[in-house]
Amino acid sequence: MLSHGNILCNCMGAFDLLREFGLGDEVFLCFLPLSHSYEFTCGMVFPVTIGAQIYYAEGVEQLGRNMVEAKPTIMTAVPRLYETMQARILRGVDKQSPLKRWLFHSAERLGRKRYHDARSLGPGERLLDLLCEKLVRSKVRERFGGRLKGMVSGGGPLNPDVGLFFVALGVRLLQGYGQTEAAPVISCNRPFAYRMHTVGPALEGVELRIAEDGEILVRGELVMKGYWNQPEATAAVLRDGWLYTGDIGRLDEQGYLMITDRKKDIVVLSGGDNVSPARVEGFLTLQPEVGQAMVFGDKRPHLVGLIVPDPDWLRDWAAANGKRDDLAELSRDEALRKAVGEAVDRVNREVSGLERIRRFAILPEPFSIENQMMTPSLKVRRHVVRQHYGALIESLYG
């Protein structure tokens, strides 16, 4: 149960945050359904409070065109959308001439270096950075409509590498954190003081505390009144005025919040070791071959994975190998399995021994809202996937 006071508290916090951009005649481009609390508050109620224009995207496939049409100044979306954008940009770059590819990757490399320490750029690098600003970053910004002040990521964990990719290319991306029970935004990086590995400091009017077991606790006007007709569930998360989020994290010396795990999503291997599946899945979905991934291993000796190839990569791979672009058919193809296996091997070299994927299967269809394996905010429903592919998961341990 969210009150008007809960939502207005969020709007006041958002205003305090975003006025650092210099709010004026703002244009928002909305992507998520308004039934989602993130979009409802940040994409509809908040823009109304500042007299902004609101455009509604036609869908994922039309989003690029809609950005050019609407020319948004502020955009809020979920991590999966930014991951998809990154993958499409990189695929487009791969098709360019060697000189254009070199300029693009130089812009990204120098942008990342400047993010970590602007003083680290030498004289030659500063000149090249100015050239990249004109020839690369300005064109990237045009693809986002040309007026974008910043994008906000919420609704799930954003891989810091994805966020840094956009920042390095001149598109500011701020990661935030929240829950429906908090109306929903709890914290967010500031426009000119962001730390990509964090979800920022608490919004104005929000108090954060870390419990002894590492759980993040929240207090303030933004906290819900309770779950409708569920007193026991309400009592489990609302105690002494604090919302027990179920997320694990810590605060750095500047008060920036870092989310480290989700209590319910931790995989406990049979040896007693704890592993975060979201971390491994994040590494997997950064690979060009991988569109979606789910990792399992609770009460098992090691991790296994279910993988959906990236559709654009799969189309190109099928054409190059003289095969029909049909995921259901190709999911059993040994050549495809070998190609995707190379991506898994790359990830295994990056993670710890406990986090390595020992075996994997390629799924015949992607996770989607239509097959109920994905939420409207593009988060995979782990329990639904486990139920649907239970026998396949078991076979990976056979």
Image (cartoon, helix red, strand yellow):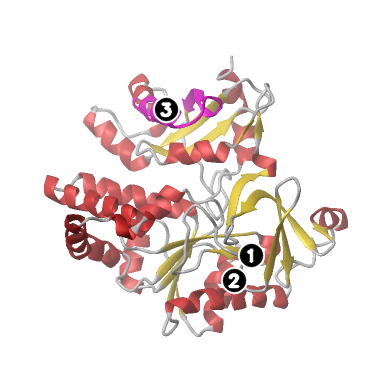
Which amino acid type is marked by label 2? Thr
- Residue 80 image point, x, y percent: 47, 51
Left or right side of 211 for 51? left
Which amino acid type is marked by label 3? Arg
Give the camera-side residue of 397 and 241. Answer: 241
Callout 1: few (<14), some (14-19), or many (20+) C-alpha neighbours within 10 Å? many
**Residue located 33% across and 53% down the image:** 112
What SS does tag 3 mark? helix
Please report the bounds of the magenta region as a residue range: 339-361
- Residue 37 image point, x, y percent: 62, 64
Would residue 312 be seen by someone viewing this image from the given angle? yes
Residue that mark 3 sits on = 349
Left or right side of 144 for 256? right
- Residue 160 image point, x, y percent: 45, 50
Left or right side of 77 for 261? right
Callout 3: few (<14), some (14-19), or many (20+) C-alpha neighbours within 10 Å? few
Would residue 366 be seen by someone viewing this image from the given angle? no
Mark number for residue 41? 2
The residues tagged by marks 2 and 3 sit, at their Cα atoms, a distance apart of: 41 Å
**Residue located 65% across and 45% down the image:** 262
Of the two numbered discs 2 and 3 on the same chain, state the one appearing first in sequence: 2
CB contact under 8 Å: marks 2 and 1: yes
Vertical placement of residue 347 versus 244, above or below = above
The residues tagged by marks 2 and 1 sit, at their Cα atoms, a distance apart of: 7 Å
Which amino acid type is marked by label 1? Pro
What SS does tag 2 mark? helix
Q: Quadrant of the N terminus?
A: bottom right
What SS does tag 1 mark? loop
Of the two numbered discs 3 and 1 on the same chain, state the one appearing first in sequence: 1
Vertical placement of residue 270 versus 18, above or below = above
Give the camera-side residue of 247 and 95. Answer: 247
Residue that mark 1 sits on = 184
